[in-house]
Amino acid sequence: KRGVFPLLFLKNTTATLISIGVDDADVSLLRSQAEHVMRLVDLSNKIESVALSENRRQLWIQSPRPEYKLVTQRYNLPNRCIGLLRPGVDVIVLPGGHEPTREFWSFMKDVLDLGEDQVIFSSGAS
């Protein structure tokens, strides 16, 4: 098996790829081909900034897919964005009906000095 596979891809900013080949020469060839293709991307219409800005609020919504059954998929994924909240500014939507998520929110709220109005808990039905 051989190819170039993404490990991390952030649109219009950075990409970390891994090349897997049959030998070192094959890996080098795949790497140079991937670099060539990445340079073909037209960046003339790129967005100036999608970063956090003091004059913008962020609404963090990370909804798990209904078929996700593992706790790590259904609850840990949405909870990972709590640490990105800025006190008194941003809002996050978290899955309701899951006591450990509520406990984690309470802990993070105290640690990060967040307000109760910065979280919206879903119904927990999905």
Image (cartoon, rainbow, N blue to C red):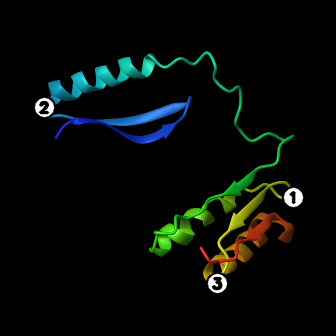
Give the quarter of the image for residue 99. bottom right
Q: Secondary structure at mark 3?
A: helix
Give the quarter of the image for residue 5. top left
Who is closer to the viewer here, 123 or 70? Answer: 123
Please give the name of the residue rendered at 71% of the width and 64% of the height, measured from the top-left corner: 93
Spatial CA distance of label 2 from label 1 is 54 Å
Q: Position of residue 46 (x, y in %)?
A: 63, 23
121 with respect to 98 (left or right) = right
Q: Position of residue 32 (x, y in %)?
A: 30, 20
Please give the name of the residue rendered at 77% of the width and 68% of the height, measured from the top-left corner: 120
- Kind of residue at badge 1: Gly
Please give the name of the residue rendered at 53% of the width and 17% of the height, measured from the top-left corner: 42
- Kind of residue at badge 3: Glu
Q: Nearer the viewer, mark 3 or mark 1?
A: 3
* 91 to 100, vertically: above or below: above
Q: Secondary structure at mark 1?
A: loop
Please give the name of the residue rendered at 81% of the width and 64% of the height, measured from the top-left corner: 118
Q: Which residue is mark 3?
A: 99
* 82 to 74, vertically: above or below: above
Spatial CA distance of label 3 from label 1 is 24 Å
- Kind of residue at badge 2: Asp
Q: Position of residue 89 (x, y in %)?
A: 85, 54
Spatial CA distance of label 2 from label 3 is 50 Å
- Of marks 2 and 3, which one's residue comes earlier in the chain? 2
Q: In the rendered picture of this protein, how many numbered marks are placed on residues?
A: 3
Q: Which residue is mark 1?
A: 88
Q: Quadrant of the C terminus?
A: bottom right
* 124 to 44, vertically: above or below: below
Q: Secondary structure at mark 2?
A: loop
Q: Which residue is mark 2?
A: 23
Q: Position of residue 65 (x, y in %)?
A: 52, 64
